[in-house]
Amino acid sequence: MAAEGWAARAAAVALLDAVLGERRMLREADPLLEGLAPPDRARAQRLAATVLRRLDAADAVLAPHLRRAPPRRVKNALRLGVTELAQGAAPHGVVNALVEAMRQNRRTAPFAGLVNAVLRQVALSPPPEPPPQKLPPWLRKPLVAAWGRRAVEGMEAVQALPPPVDLTPRDGAIPEGAEPLPTGSLRLPAGTQVTALPGWAEGGFWVQDAGAALAARLLDARPGEAVVDLCAAPGGKTLQLAAMGARVTAVDISAPRLERLRQNLARTGLSAEVVAADALHWTPPAPVEAVLLDAPCSATGTIRRHPDLPFVKDGADLPALTALQAALIDRALAMLAPGGRLVFCTCSILPEEGEAQLTAALARHPGLAVEPPGLPGLDPRWITPAGALRLLPHHWAERGGIDGFFIARLRLPG
């Protein structure tokens, strides 16, 4: 009889292989979970993410027990076992399931004894809760230079924990147990199954980090106003703008990602024109009053939700991303009528994808003005000297943090 829980753990090990060996994001490795029941899929994803948040500590525990490095899949199974033991999981369940997972694969079967022996030794003196894992040098060094060591340590502390679930409510819908946040979002504990909440099927709310929700609120679309949402998928901001009563055109280069946006529109009963196109080459039929540009970026502000990112990326794509962001800002401004406004944002905590982009855009476009945010619930310390919003992951640390964002509202001369 196979050990209970081995399938989910084997899938978690496969996910770790994809991230650490093939440098694929967890969402790109979803096909590895095909055939698993939904609870096992969720468990595999949760286990893999937990290991990535504690990888250095797991390796430190394993080092004295390994004379030579085992194959990658075996090492990842050991990392998973050590991580679960540190969290207080029952040793016999962890060991038996991971040994079974090794036996089920002919390449790892010869190492089942090693996994059994090492994890039983570790279980005799379970490792303590590790300190927060440090960001990789390619990211940590520029962040320390930009925000200071103490701030970066605060980010690492927040990123070590599973993030809470944030919702954007519609029509005052508040699920039971949700904490209202000062900026208007709702917060639920990490791991909440939102699709089971009363009001989900009726479109009373959608999942959206509290930081991401501020961009559309800052745009402040008015009923009947023509608004373009560039790089719109998966659609949280489109839903916000449509709920404000704007006539929204949602543009994204990815047709598959737009399908999720259409599903969200159908569930909520909101409407928007959906266009699959490259924003650099698409033009609205007539100038519009407002554009929201959530530009492609390094996504370094979302590591608390995507602990795989530091292991997959290395910063090499940053020059291309910053060039694309500048081009998209210019393109978005060209879509506006005189006096129109643009909200530019990135989910990055690197200044070259935020503060530096704003400085450069103002230099390229004489007369372009920054309109400082006046939203309720904002901490004044989040507002930069130039009048933009700078959110860092350790803001609201006592509540579980917030995704890192740079958000600026710009207006053309009339």
Image (cartoon, rainbow, N blue to C red):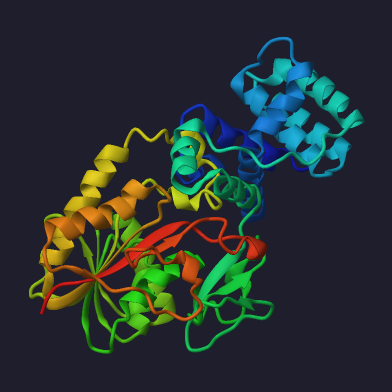
- 329 left or right of 170? left
Q: Is residue 3 visible?
A: no
Residue that sits furthest to the right in the current view: 124
Q: Quadrant of residue 9?
A: top right
**Residue 207 in the image: x percent, y percent?**
50, 68
Image spot of residue 179 (x, y percent) = 64, 76
Q: Quick one: quadrant of the C terminus? A: bottom left
- Against 112, residue 197 (above or below) is below
Residue found at x 52% / y 45% = 148
- The image position of residue 68, as x and y in percent, is 69, 10
Residue at the location (14% across, 59% down)? 331
- Residue visible at 55% across and 38% down in the picture: 135
List x then y, in percent, for residue 251: 23, 64
Q: Is residue 56 visible?
A: yes
Judge whether 54 appears above or below 73 on screen: below
Residue 69 found in image quarter: top right
